[in-house]
Amino acid sequence: MKDLMATWEFPPYKVGGIASHVNDLSLALTKMGHEVHVLTYGDQSSDVEQSKVFVHRLSSTYAPNTISWSMFLCQKMEKAAIRLHKEHHFDVVHAHDWMMVPAGVGIKKVLRLPMVFTLHSTEAGRSGVHDAYTKMINDLEWYGTYESDQIITVGCDFCDEVKGLFHPPEGKIHYIPNGVDMKRFEDVKFFLDKATFASDWEKVVLFVGRMSHQKGLEFLVWAAPKILRTHPEAKFVVSGGGDHSQYRSLANQLGVGSKFYFAGYTPEHLLPSLYSMATATVAPSIYEPFGIVALESSAAHTPVVGSYVGGLKDTIVHEYTGLHTYPAHVQSIIDQTDRVLSDTSWAKWMGENGHSWVSHNFTWDKISRWTTGIYGKALKLWE
Amino acid sequence: MPRILIFAKEFNLGEPISSFCEFFAFRMAEHGIECDLVVFGGGDGIPYAEKRLAGALTVYRAPFQMHANTYFNWILLMNNELKRVGRRLAEENEYVLVLANDWTSAPAASSIAAYFNIPLVTAMHSTEQNRGFSYENSQPISDLEWEACYLSKRVVAMNADCRNSLAFDLKVPSDKIITVEGLFDYTGLIKEVARQT
């Protein structure tokens, strides 16, 4: 089968989780015998082969906002797809998130290909639909669900959210979780020096995520003073892109500034080492369609304390691979983090359980097989 | 009988691009060429397919119900529907030429022309530079105009101002530009069509 993926971000360009998702999925599909071509953004246009995946990068233009920017990029992608289709004869086009909807639909209409659309999150969940700009993004998400032949959502709860928002026909929408490349975590090649973040005697409490409200970092910062009262050995390490100044100043105001280390964005190859040096990972999200952090942490044998929201409901098994907290509930974060830090051997046991739980249920081999099944469903509609 | 596939944003009597399309089809009919025009619209009493000029021009309207936050975004989304209708027509007919009108229909016209290997000609009624380059999306619009001109075998300029802008702002080679002054002098354009047929 020949698949044409459309994603605005693809490694080494990485902002959110879509880049890794598409990369890992493409590699897994390639292993299954698919020929995968990825249309994506690049500073300069190029066609290269990356680990048997054909990556076609296209530049965009100056535009006043992300919607116009992606619209322009999409129409360039469509032209590239027409050129490539003449040589490769694709079977399916797979668009990822709202930014790629115009490309997916355009390619579908010109090349008459079945279209699969993966929603990784929604604007309603990320920031709410409150003006013309956010409504346009929301409308593009709807347009993607309307025009596509099959829809994939990355979370079970999130699948229900999309059903409620866009009302697609029942048989058209599916839940396929994200996955983790276990090799990255079992065969760690790059190691971080713990001394960079914390002293020998300190236990690292890790946060990984973008500096955005939906990730709920402020609740962890609010919880820190009470956690430190019972566990002065805790050291909070915050990793993720974006402006962390507000969280840093909140930590300073609460008198725990010295107990926080803001590491900024951690490159993909260093993440396994970062997770493995932590005693626990805390994911205090208030909105999380999937929550790859919980899987990555489990893959690195580190238990997760995460909100009972969205995908985290499925990726953490309470008191087996980690602990659930009430969403946006500071006392709940304090209590559960205290439990993990107080009983290190229990925490290790949960970390081991997490590792086997993830390696049995969230591998890309399984996910690529499920995705191939969805491609098959989309193809059948065109027979 | 040779046919030409035209793309335009809309077809409303009196609107300049619509008038150009009709007049162009009229002149082509004199040379035994029929035209199909794909535009946005249809429904609410407006026909999806309409024959004009005694059958020399057939107007196909593609409905599109979605709103957008800017004109630029709406045009690019609406073009997907022009592509859908254009693809169907190109499968049913053998076209000798695809004619785009302005950036508002160029994305659809250039895609269909590229997919079916049909020569593309773009009629530029004005450029974004002519219009003042004062809109928030002027840069991407200008880039779309540049791309349409780049992909076209020939570019039709509707007046001297447009010709100058094509030559100096969009750097279109002067031998690629055909100027059609005031909708009357079609000699260059007809020659180009004859060459393609």
Image: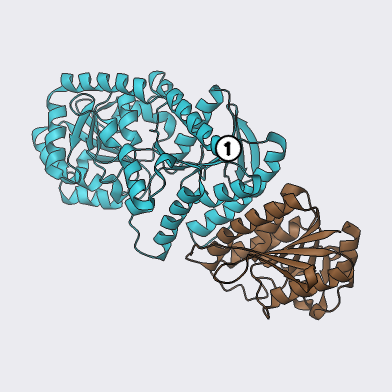
Chain colours: A cyan, B brown
Residue A225 at x, y percent in the picture = 13, 42
Q: Quadrant of the C terminus of chain A?
A: top right
Q: Is residue A295 above or below residue B39?
A: above
Task: Answer with left or right where residue B191 lies relative to residue A60.
Answer: right
Residue A81 at x, y percent in the picture = 65, 43
Task: Answer with left or right where residue B100 lies relative to residue A105.
Answer: right
Residue A187 at x, y percent in the picture = 41, 18
Decide which of A50, B68 is in the foreground and name it.
B68
Task: Answer with left or right where residue A179 lies relative to residue B36.
Answer: left
Residue B133 at x, y percent in the picture = 61, 72
Give the structural element (helix, strand or loop) at label 1.
strand
Q: Quadrant of the N terminus of chain A?
A: top right
Residue sitting at x 66%, y 63%:
B105
Tell me if I can see residue A192 in this picture: no
How many labels sit on residues? 1
The chain to which mark 1 is attached is: A
Question: Which residue is denoted by mark 1 in the rendering?
Answer: A92
Circle 1 crowding by C-alpha within 10 Å: few under 14, some 14–19, many from 20: many
